[in-house]
Image: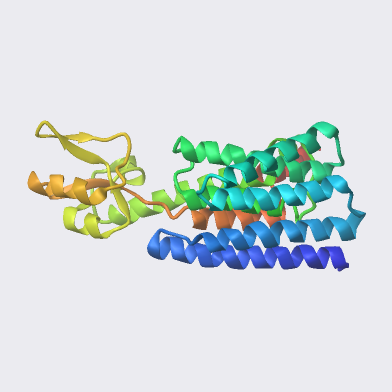
Amino acid sequence: MGPSDAIQLISVLFVTAVLSISSYMDIRYRTVPDRHWLAVGTVGPVGSFLYRALEDGIGFDDVVVLASCVLMTVFILTDNGPTVVCGAVAGISAFAVLAHGCDPYTFAGALSVIFGFLYMVLYYFGIVRGGADAKLLITVGMSFPAYVGLLHTASKGILEVLFVPSLSMLYTGAIVAVLYCVTFFLWINRGKKGLGLRRLVSGSLPLEKAERSFVWATVDIMNGVLVPIRRYEDDQGELYRRLKAYRVEDVPVTPMVPFILPLTIAFIINVTVGDPLSLLDHWLSSGIG
């Protein structure tokens, strides 16, 4: 193992440790302090920069990308007005590197900053629901802009071009989250008969138990009638008070998925074997060939 590989391995272990702690906190408290993303968003890009320096040497574009990553981290972790300038400079600088033309690794680094803005948009529109989830995708994406492939060399195929590492983490994490939900519904529906396939996708809990659990109530009272709701309320306490007032005993629920854990699992898959779809495509192509 050369010095560059050692730097990359240290970065992987550091980020894995931070994500593991974050997963525990998300499961236990459903909140993760910003200092976790500050650590990943500074140590990770610096590790990527050092890896690049030891592997191929660095140029001015690489320095610009590192500065853009640091500015992007400051932007997403602070709320005051002046830091908007940091975000603007980060985006403009990254775009300038892409427009100027550079080698693939530097290009991937600049692209990771641009994708950071995409994840902010997904958070704004509620597609990525948790702020910590978006911060994880942004900071980890900037830390590992290219596939590491500890156990499998990245194929550089079309899928790994389309699915940058952070985007691969997002869809892989979503698959893991779906499995988490199925497991949750199987657990709360255990012993119940006659549900068929519905036991995989829906379930209910006694109202008082639901109130103490990390779940979203999926119904509300409107005009004295129990109706499904399309967007889950952040103020679940008020919702449960309304349900209690109408003496609802069992309430349909869906789990508050601690999405940091699925993303952590996705990260481990990402850095060990690369993009799952690319790996599957590689296996199928090899089998056909």
What percent of the width, then of the height, locates residue 201? Answer: 35, 43
What percent of the width, then of the height, locates residue 136? Answer: 57, 53
What percent of the width, then of the height, locates residue 87? Answer: 63, 43
Quadrant placement of the N terminus: bottom right
Residue at (59, 48) in percent of width and height:
75
Q: How is the image coloured?
A: rainbow
Between 40 and 2, the residue placed more toward the observer is 40
Q: Is residue 133 left or right of residue 55?
A: left
> Can residue 127 be seen by looking at this rendering?
no
Q: Tag count in the figure?
A: 0
Residue at (58, 47) in percent of width and height:
83
What percent of the width, then of the height, locates residue 241? Answer: 15, 49
Residue at (25, 60) in percent of width and height:
212
Quadrant placement of the C terminus: top right
Q: Is residue 135 left or right of residue 95?
A: left
Q: Is residue 257 left or right of residue 284?
A: left
Residue at (28, 58) in percent of width and height:
213
Instruction: Say if 100 sits above or below 59 in the image.
Output: above
**Residue positioned most to the front:** 82
Between 218 and 175, the residue placed more toward the observer is 218
Q: Quadrant of residue 196?
A: top left
